Amino acid sequence: MKTWIKKTGILSGAISLTMLLCTNAVFAVSALPKQAYLPLEMAQKAADTALQTCKKDGYMVSVTVVDRSGVVKVVLRGDGAGPHTLGSSAGKAYTAASMKRATLGLANFIKDKPALHGLRDMDDRMLILGGGLPIKIGGEVVGGIGVGGAPGGHLDEACAKAGIQSLTQF
């Protein structure tokens, strides 16, 4: 009889411990952080719209879209766009996502502040010229878009802005 009671007690303890561990596992999963992300379909739409906007305006450009970590999701090189435009668009997209702000605004911000010129050299992937914009979903930066090849950063930025504005239908 004592053996049966001992075995029953051990079994009850094991069941209780298992239930406790399962409850904590469920709690741990539900407490995980949730972040918005940039779906591929949206990245493609933004890139294509930016490219077509610049093409319509007569500019031969490349467009790059990156995720929040600066990893490339989409690259489009328009017909006639120079080879340098690929690196330019990628650098602007990376910078916009990393710094969470427009690259033209960042360039203007540091232009007259010698103490901030080091920002240009802090990461080889960054390019602080107009044409890069952060992509936000619900106020959260989920990526960046960069355009390179138009005759001026403000023109690159206008095409990038058109790309972002095309995402309102999602």
Image (spheres, rainbow, N blue to C red):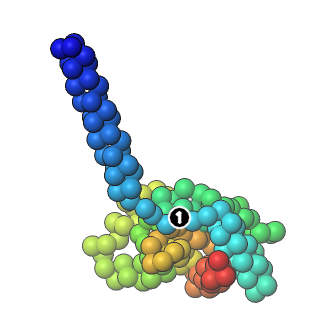
In the image, taking residue 29 as reference, residue 63 lies left or right, namely right
* Closer to us: 76 or 80: 76
Residue, x 25% and y 16% (percent of image)? Answer: 4
Q: Residue 15: x percent and y percent?
A: 31, 32
Labels in figure, total:
1
Tell me, yes or no, if residue 136 can be seen here: yes
Residue 37's place in the image compared with 155, above or below, is above
Residue, x 35% and y 56% (percent of image)? Answer: 31
Tell me, yes or no, if residue 127 can be seen here: no
The C terminus: image quadrant: bottom right
Residue, x 54% and y 69% (percent of image)? Answer: 144
The N terminus: image quadrant: top left
* Closer to us: 76 or 107: 76
Q: Residue 47: x percent and y percent?
A: 68, 71
Q: Amino acid at mark 1?
A: Tyr
User: Outermost residue toward the right?
Assistant: 79
In the image, taking residue 11 as reference, residue 161 lies left or right, namely right
- Residue at which label 1 appears: 37
User: Outermost residue toward the left?
Assistant: 2
Residue 148's place in the image compared with 8, above or below, is below
* Closer to us: 91 or 50: 50
User: Outermost residue toward the front?
Assistant: 1
* Closer to us: 49 or 157: 49
Residue, x 59% and y 71% (percent of image)? Answer: 146
In the image, taking residue 12 as reference, residue 36 lies left or right, namely right
The residue carrying pointer 1 sits among few (fewer than 14), some (14 to 19) or many (20 or more) residues within 10 Å by Cα, namely some
In the image, taking residue 74 as reference, residue 18 lies left or right, namely left
Which image quadrant for residue 85?
bottom right
SS of the residue at dot 1? loop
Q: Residue 97: x percent and y percent?
A: 48, 67
Q: Residue 36: x percent and y percent?
A: 49, 66
